[in-house]
Image (cartoon, grey):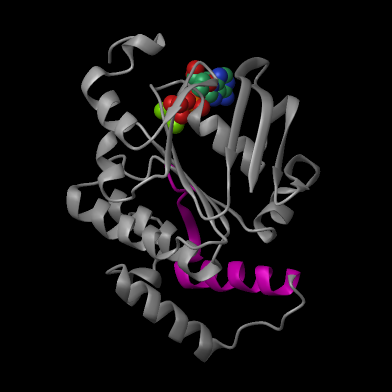
Amino acid sequence: MLEIKDLRAEVDGKEILKGFNLTVPKGEVHAIMGPNGSGKSTLSYVLSGKDGYEVTGGSATWNGQDLFAMSPEERAQAGVFLAFQYPMEIPGVASLTFLRAAMNAHRKARGEAEISIPDFMRAVKTEAEKLSISMEMLKRPLNVGFSGGEKKRNEVLQMALLKPTLCLLDEMDSGLDIDAIRIAAEGVNRLRSPDTAMIVITHYQRLLNYITPDVVHVMARGQVLRSGGKELAVELEESGYASYGAEAA
Ligand code: ADP
Ligand code: MG
Ligand code: MG
């Protein structure tokens, strides 16, 4: 399971996470909802090990392993995957090339041989089809000129191929229309398993109609202020975040 205790972290000398606590058992999906600026993306960056985010206190362990003692690559190899709110565009690297390199890095870390090109192409075709991603698109540079929905589906494709066990999904629904959300969410649901823990970060309840969480947490000002069942998301949709100290949008 994922255990985060009294986590404090800062960016550019500004404390963003201010004693954050969260436990996600394997097999569960937890939603983190909160107003803009509450530190949701910062949390996902800190857990995945992005540069420039300094942990100043507390701990985070995944299956008993201290995440902060590991490099970002080691965390990825331990099964941690962050699907970005705004996936990066990488000009000059075809999506297929990127996907194969990522799969091979994981295999290498496990002491396995590289995946053969035919096996790779078969795996990609199978998963891409489920996500309505064309092979044409995968020959293009990673995310360059992709629509919001295509970028998010591409993140889900990476997850489907890498099979992470700790999935951090940062505002997967931002900028997506209903059909794109449904396709991406179905892809995420296929990855749910007894060995997988997921954190679904979202501002809106809507996404949780497609990915049903076991627990919903309200995050504001760098802390979890309240936790509850999926009905809490519906309540938030009606009442907004004002009672959690957030300004109305
Ligand atoms: P959320 O994802 O919940 O909208 P973020 O984690 O993106 O929140 O941001 C939390 C807070 O951290 C915001 O107040 C934001 O302005 C601040 N912040 C984010 N990045 C930086 C940075 N590089 N330097 C200073 N402050 C930052
Ligand atoms: Mg934000
Ligand atoms: Mg964010």
Residue at the limit of the structure toward the left, as seen here: 178
Q: Nearer the viewer, residue 214 or 61?
A: 214
Q: Is 103 on the left or on the right of 191, as rendered?
A: right
Percent across and percent down for residue 106 are: 66, 68
Residue at the limit of the structure toward the bottom, as seen here: 118
Number of on-image labels: 0
Percent across and percent down for residue 166 are: 57, 53
* Above/below status of 94 relative to 165: below
* Above/below status of 137 relative to 229: below
Tell me where residue 46 sits by quadrant.
Answer: top right
User: Which image quadrant shows ligand 3?
Assistant: top left
* Identity of the residue drawn at 54% across and 66% down: 163
Q: Is residue 228 magenta?
A: no
Q: Nearer the viewer, residue 155 or 242?
A: 242
* Above/below status of 51 relative to 159: above
Tell me where residue 55 sits by quadrant.
Answer: top right
* Identity of the residue drawn at 39% across and 22% down: 36
Q: Is residue 100 magenta?
A: yes
The quarter of the picture where the C terminus appears is: top left
Q: Is 234 on the left or on the right of 107, as rendered?
A: left
Tell me where residue 59 sits by quadrant.
Answer: top right
Q: Which residues are magenta?
A: 83-109
Q: Is residue 55 visible?
A: yes
Q: Is 29 on the left or on the right of 236, as rendered?
A: right
Q: Nearer the viewer, residue 79 or 84?
A: 79
* Identity of the residue drawn at 45% across and 60% down: 192
Percent across and percent down for residue 112 are: 72, 80
* Identity of the residue drawn at 41% across and 30% down: 228
Q: Is 25 on the left or on the right of 248, as rendered?
A: right
* Above/below status of 202 relative to 213: above
Percent across and percent down for residue 151 are: 36, 54
